[in-house]
Image: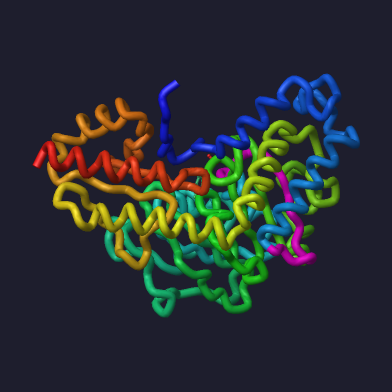
Amino acid sequence: MARVYNFGAGPSTLPLAVLERAREELTDWRGTGMSVMEISHRDKAFISVAEQAEADLREIMAIPRNYKVLFVQGGATSQFAMVPMNLLRGKRRANYVLTGAWSKRAIGEARLFCEAAIAAAPEDDNFTTIPRREDWEVDPDAAYLHYTSNETIDGVEFQDVPDAGALPLVADMSSNILSRCIDVSRFGLIYAGAQKNLGPAGITIVIVRDDLIGDTLPGTPSMLDYAKHAANGSMLNTPPTFNWYLVGLVLQWIKEQGGLAAIEAHNKRKAEKLYTAIDASSLYRNRIDPGCRSRMNVPFVLADDSLSGSFLTKAEEVGLTALKGHRSVGGMRASIYNAMSEEGVDVLIAFMDEFERSHG
Ligand SMILES: *Cc1c(COP(=O)(O)O)cnc(C)c1O
């Protein structure tokens, strides 16, 4: 089969070594004569997979002991509701930073439960920058401050963790978790759907400081209660065991790459190369403020939009797939998550260059 580089935004490319290992073990896992997906989640063997994944995540991110790590379902979208249901703790207001399509969705859902006050938002409708921290209006009496560390659709990423003062800082890290080093102790809660940097869709990671849980809104169902998940080792019901196992393999792969510092350096190199190529060209353009450009999702438009269809078709022909931008913003988007090799980015840049020369 021809070589393919998958630039899809999610579900997205996974390390080939992980897929090959999963294939090898698919029908006979650890000599059991069964697939890992056929084994009870209460079985000692599976519990060891679950515990190892948590231990590896704790090690890779240096998660302090007073944080719970939960493996839940329902995607990041369920977290848009679970965060207010669990973290309002008697308050009626929470601060939200609006930087793109995903923070907008988080705000919409939070408004089912509380007053989601906009602490900061761009001046116009274009999500091309992040308002300066000095200009944010954060209510210190609200329950928490929520932001989206990487806006997957718009291509805007925080380069630093914003100061939340004494408020619990909550981050939707779905599309940049494990892509760079962060200090977990700065956060009250971090959540991330797996299908960008962690594994397949269907499992979501929540990292939450333990003093923040246990005081949910009245009527909160058990499945939406962090404290109940924590008390039951994320096995309040049957968890998505195969996804959990795959996340575990991805975490082992990250350790083999040299951990987050090595992953971050790799991601930085890939992104710098691609943005440099875009900036140097007269056909391609990225509209994001250079100080807020995402290392994970690189959207770009063609100066002559009538060439976009042909760009995508030709890219597809040479194995560069899923480069079409999100339907809400159009243009192109190259998602270059952890599992995208530097070689994949080089091949993309060479293709873009060739396409520009033949249409110059
Ligand atoms: C993909 C994504 C989501 C939505 O995740 P689901 O698992 O589909 O609910 C939310 N936030 C961000 C930043 C994302 O990239």
User: Can you tell which quarter of the image residue 236 is in?
Assistant: top right
Identity of the residue furthest to the right in this view:
44
Point out residue 178 in the picture as x, y percentages from the top left corner: 58, 55
In the picture provided, is 353 more to the left or to the right than 137? left
Tell how many labels. Answer: 0
Q: Is 70 inside the magenta-drawn segment?
A: yes
In the picture provided, is 260 more to the left or to the right than 55? left
Residue 128 visible? The answer is yes
Point out residue 204 in the picture as x, y percentages from the top left corner: 64, 44
Please state the extent of the stretch shown in magenta in the rendering: 62-77
Q: Identify the residue shown where x is 68% and y is 35%.
A: 243
Point out residue 172 in the picture as x, y percentages from the top left corner: 55, 55
Q: Is 248 inside the magenta-drawn segment?
A: no
In the picture provided, is 113 more to the left or to the right than 118? right
Q: Quadrant of the C terminus?
A: top left
**Compared to 11, does 104 lie above or below?**
below
Q: Identify the residue shown where x is 29% and y is 65%.
A: 123
Q: 360 or 214: which is nearer to us?
A: 360
Q: 220 or 189: which is nearer to us?
A: 189
User: Can you tell which quarter of the image residue 295 is in?
Assistant: bottom left
Q: Identify the residue shown where x is 49% and y is 37%.
A: 12
- The way the protein has been coloured in the rendering is rainbow
Point out residue 233 in the picture as x, y percentages from the top left corner: 83, 46
**Compared to 224, does 30 lie above or below?**
above
Identity of the residue furthest to the left in this view:
360
Q: 268 or 247: which is nearer to us?
A: 268
